[in-house]
């Protein structure tokens, strides 16, 4: 019998205004999927090969597109799947501190290189109280006030990272807490490259699974609220979307690095999973105008995307020039003509 992984999944049916629940089965041997209707106790989709779903997409909390249905993976469907995949999907909180926000592209590339993935991300500006609450475990330490003052002095980028032994792996990427020690003993670490001292040390990482759970809840609440507010300026800016295919191909770091190196300021950043209704609304201006409209919608809701606020003089024009033509083939011939 072929190995299979089972997940509980939900899909909101807009035509019936109902939340439909399924068991999603994935067969890694041939990349096929099967769906079982939980309410009606019958097969909804017979085992069918589906190349657009990959093993790395399968984790609780993710959204996956199966034949134009955007499914929320809400839990494991059996104990075998929980045992097999649960240990490989450890989560931790990574925070880029104010002194290294402009190095976000380099840092995300380091995350990918460590076989971790970014599942959530948000740029925010913490108040003094929020920073103090976040670091409450250090309240009695002599460095507490300086740390809180520094972390609340500018924007930070909070990220949820996932992967094998994510807590330990990310802390290894960070390097020693004291940047001076990191520069001597771990020169290729994040703090070795971008840190200054023990406080201005470029990044933060949870020190245990319990701390990770608390810190992730602080930035990405699972119940009510949205956590600390974003940093959008809404002036002299334009919107950039890093599309799902680029994120799945681990190109996010390279794209962010290129944007910053070309003189643009990323003044806000957040990862989203867009449903089809929102994707259609966002791209409505292209409806009936370009033949690729439906494909554009399919792509935008096929996985997580990253929204950026780009701040610059005459941002809409200059940033579109930087991005180049939407069709890479057209861009290729533009280079030849030049």
Image (tube, helix red, strand yellow):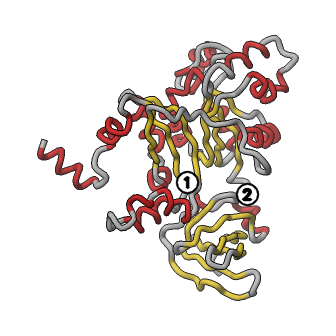
Residue shown at 63%/40% (left/top)? 159
Nearest to the eye among marks 2 and 1: give it.
Answer: 1
Q: How many numbered marks have been drawn onto this rendered protein structure?
A: 2
- Whichever of callouts 2 and 1 sits on the residue coming sooner in the sequence is 2
Q: The C terminus is located in which quarter?
A: top left
The quadrant in which residue 134 appears is top right
The residue under label 1 is 304
| Residue 107 visible in the picture | no
Q: Residue furthest toward the left?
A: 337
Q: Identify the residue at the far right of this view.
A: 140
**The N terminus, quarter of image:** bottom right
Query: Please, is residue 100 above or below residue 239 in the view?
Result: above
| Percent of width and height locating residue 191 | 59, 22
Q: Position of residue 242 (x, y in %)?
A: 46, 47
- Dividing the picture into quadrants, the one containing residue 186 is top right
Other residues around mark 2 within 10 Å, as few (<14) / some (14–19) / many (≥20): some
Q: Nearer the viewer, residue 50 or 284?
A: 284
Q: Is residue 272 visible?
A: yes
Q: Which residue is mark 2?
A: 86
Q: Are marks 2 and 1 in contact (CB under 8 Å)?
A: no
Q: Position of residue 172 (x, y in %)?
A: 64, 32
Residue visible at 72% across and 75% down in the picture:
21
- Helix, strand, or loop for circle 2? helix
């Amino acid at each position: 019998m072929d190995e299979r992984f089972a997940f509980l999944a939900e899909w909101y049916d807009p035509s019936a205004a109902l939340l439909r629940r399924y068991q999603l089965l994935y067969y890694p041997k041939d990349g096929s999927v099967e769906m079982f209707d939980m309410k009606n106790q019958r097969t909804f989709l017979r085992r069918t090969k589906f190349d657009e779903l990959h093993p790395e997409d399968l984790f609780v909390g993710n959204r996956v597109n199966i034949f134009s249905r955007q499914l929320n993976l809400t839990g494991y469907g059996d104990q075998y799947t929980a045992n097999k995949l649960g240990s490989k999907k450890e989560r931790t909180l990574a925070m880029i501190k104010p002194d290294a926000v402009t190095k976000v592209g380099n840092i995300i590339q380091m995350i990918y290189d460590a076989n971790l993935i970014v599942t959530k991300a948000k740029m925010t500006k913490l108040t003094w109280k929020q920073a103090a609450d976040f670091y409450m475990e250090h309240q009695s330490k002599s460095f507490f006030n300086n740390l809180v003052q520094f972390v609340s002095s500018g924007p930070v980028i909070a990220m949820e990272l996932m992967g094998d032994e994510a807590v330990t792996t990310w802390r290894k990427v960070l390097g020693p807490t004291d940047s001076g020690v990191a520069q001597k003993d771990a020169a290729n670490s994040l703090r070795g490259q971008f840190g200054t001292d023990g406080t201005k040390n470029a990044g933060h990482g949870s020190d245990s699974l319990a701390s990770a759970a608390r810190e992730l809840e602080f930035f990405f609440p699972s119940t009510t609220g949205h956590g600390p507010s974003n940093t959008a300026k809404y002036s002299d800016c334009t919107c950039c979307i890093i599309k799902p295919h680029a994120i799945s191909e681990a190109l996010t770091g390279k794209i962010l690095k290129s944007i910053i190196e070309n003189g643009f300021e990323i003044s806000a950043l957040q990862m989203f999973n867009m449903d089809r209704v929102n994707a259609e609304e966002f791209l409505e201006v292209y409806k009936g105008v370009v033949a690729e409209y439906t494909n554009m919608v399919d792509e935008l809701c096929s996985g997580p995307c990253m929204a950026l606020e780009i701040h610059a003089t005459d941002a809409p024009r200059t940033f579109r020039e930087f991005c180049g033509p939407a069709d890479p083939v057209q861009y290729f011939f533009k280079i030849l003509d030049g």
